[in-house]
Image (cartoon, rainbow, N blue to C red):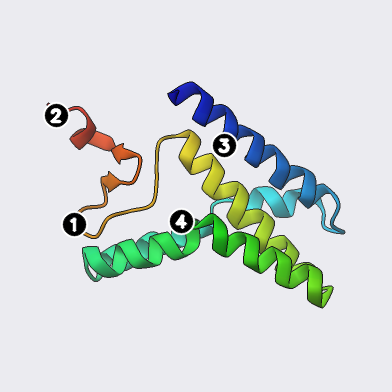
Amino acid sequence: MKMLLKLEEFAQLGLSTYLFSLLDFAWWWYLVLFLVPDLGMLGYLISNRIGAWSYNLFHHKAIAICIYLLGVFLSNEQCLLAGCILFGHAAFDRILGYGLKYSDSFNHTHLGNVGNSAKTP
């Protein structure tokens, strides 16, 4: 089952890349902006609760889809770009095992524990 979920996330990453290819941006924009959603981790400098909230804001696929659809309805390429980046980045993170965060710890995600806490029994 775990492999099937990773394949699904890989397909979503491919969809993000394909939708980006339909936009009028150079490919290097996708590469440069791909890690920008990780700025949501800066909230952890304040507290676990704020960190989880800000991280999840930038890694929630429904938000990415809403931003992309807003771009469709407004014919706004920047919204389309942001939606593609957010969606693709979230899928990539899930391939690596990083899910949406719980407020108790950065390592506690909806996909289970990651990092050193994943190795403890």
The residue located at (29%, 70%) in the rendering is: 50
Counting from the top left corner in percent of width and height, residue 23 is at 84, 57
Looking at the image, residue 11 sits to the left or right of residue 72; the answer is left
Identified by mark 1, the residue type is Asp
**Residue positioned most to the front:** 1
**The N terminus - image quarter:** top left
Looking at the image, residue 79 sits to the left or right of residue 40; the answer is right
Tell me whether the residue at label 3 lies in contact with that at label 4, contact meaning CB atoms closer than 8 angstroms.
no
Q: Which mark is residue 9?
A: 3
Q: Earlier in the sequence, mark 4 or mark 2?
A: 4
Identified by mark 3, the residue type is Glu
Badge 2 crowding class, 10 Å Cα cut-off, few under 14, some 14 to 19, many 20 or more, is few
Question: Closer to us: mark 1 or mark 4?
Answer: 1
Residue 33 visible to an observer of this rendering: no
Q: Which residue is mark 4?
A: 38
Question: Closer to us: mark 4 or mark 2?
Answer: 2
Badge 3 crowding class, 10 Å Cα cut-off, few under 14, some 14 to 19, many 20 or more, is many
Distance, label 1 to label 2, CA atoms, is 17 Å
User: Is label 3 in a helix, a strand or a loop?
Assistant: helix
Q: Which mark is residue 104?
A: 1
Q: Which mark is residue 120?
A: 2
Q: Earlier in the sequence, mark 1 or mark 4?
A: 4
Distance, label 1 to label 3, CA atoms, is 25 Å
Tell me whether the residue at label 1 lies in contact with that at label 3, contact meaning CB atoms closer than 8 angstroms.
no
The residue located at (72%, 55%) in the rendering is: 29
Tell me whether the residue at label 3 lies in contact with that at label 2, contact meaning CB atoms closer than 8 angstroms.
no
Q: Earlier in the sequence, mark 3 or mark 4?
A: 3
Counting from the top left corner in percent of width and height, residue 99 is at 39, 46
